[in-house]
Image (cartoon, rainbow, N blue to C red):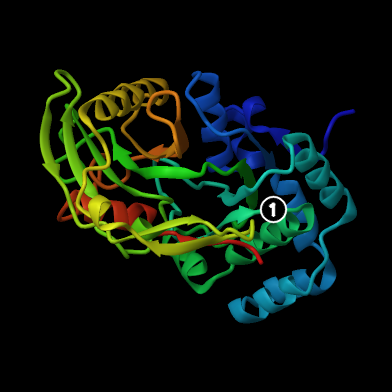
Amino acid sequence: MSNTYTKSLDQLRRDDESSFGGKSVSLGELLAAQIPVPPGFALSTAAYSEFAAQPDIAAAISEGAADAIAETMRGGTMLAGARDEIAGAYEALGEPPVAVRSSAIGEDSEEATFAGQQETFLWVQGADQVCEAVRNCWISLYSPTAVSYRARLGREREAAMGVTIQEMVDAEISGVMFTCNPVSGDPSMVAVNASWGLGLAVVGGEVTPDDYLVSKVTREVVRAQINDKHHEYVPDPNGRGAIRRDVEDERRTARCLDEDALATLVDVAKRVERHFGSRQDIEWAIARGTTAPDGLYLLQSRPVTGVEGPKPKPAPASAIAAVMTTFGANVKRGSR
């Protein structure tokens, strides 16, 4: 029986962007290129459109007050067809803890990135909690920040959202990498940032990650700045959400990645760039108790939008500043 609202991530391709959003189709493309991505499924924009078309919600949206829209949507009920498909796809996935990520139309495009504008929820478990997190992703489409951003782009009427539901990686190490130097735009380099645990501590500005610059050609580590990574996020022992804990003294100033791991990341970065045909910034994780390449997963990839193009934005002052600008998203530790 065909599904109306959901597709497995590995079924998605670029042509599905208008129905499932940028993030989900990017993950589908990575899977098509045989690049390791945690399994999951995508919810289409049709589920959002039907939810938003309910009379009270549609009326709130038409009036345009962000707080009123959020309050009305929070009290709204997801239609049964979408809820049933989410529950079925989640059961087929094995009902693991998942990340529930916004996948807005136009998100992660070469013209603009909506990173930081909509919500992501981590370590969500249970079908009801997944549906709640999906609704909260939809609500974030009308946050003051997201509305203002779309207005600046002239896209006020383009609000539409798919959602990515993706198995969580219990990350021992996580980070981001750019397939160019994000400060200078040098395409011969890969810039890598890494820290212990889940990426929450980095995107929240709570730690300064290790900062590496590696040659694509020779794999030479041109720069290795090892920083004091005093906090990390790990799964909450109660099975839902994530908690912050102190990093042991011996790991705080230890480097996260050795040269073999960096070489693996560079190889993967080159494959991603070659597949998409443009410079990419990539979120990655290495599963606890494993090493790269076996435990390496990519969590998302998007075009670099700040150092290339006909009208580039001012380059960030440092690679870490670029990480914060790009991935400083509204990430929630869990749905309780």
**Residue 313 appears in the picture as rendered:** no
Please tell me which residue is depicted at 86% across the width and 57% down the height of the picture.
79
Q: Relative to residue 8, is residue 34 depicted above or below?
A: above
Q: Residue 147 in the image: state x and y as whole percent.
A: 52, 67
Label tally? 1
Q: Quadrant of the N terminus?
A: top right
Q: Can residue 147 be seen by looking at this rendering?
A: yes
Q: Circle 1 is placed at which residue position?
A: 125
Mark 1 residue crowding within 10 angstroms, few (<14) / some (14–19) / many (20+)? many
Residue beneath the point at 47% across and 69% down: 145
Percent coordinates x, y for residue 229 in the rendering: 26, 57
Q: Inspect the image, locate mark 1, and give the three-letter code of the amino acid beneath it.
A: Gln
Q: Residue at x 75, y 42 (%)?
A: 90
Q: Nearer the viewer, residue 295 or 265?
A: 295
Query: Left or right of 97: which side holds 144?
Result: left
Q: Nearer the viewer, residue 102 or 313?
A: 102
Which quadrant of the figure has residue 307? top left
Residue 302 in the image: state x and y as whole percent.
41, 39
Q: Is residue 193 left or right of residue 277?
A: left
The quarter in which the C terminus is drawn is bottom right
Q: Is residue 9 above or below residue 244?
A: above
User: Who is closer to the viewer here, 173 or 50?
Assistant: 173
Q: Secondary structure at mark 1?
A: loop
The relative height of residue 170 versus residue 240 in the rendered view (above or below) is: above
Residue 192 at x, y percent in the picture: 25, 39
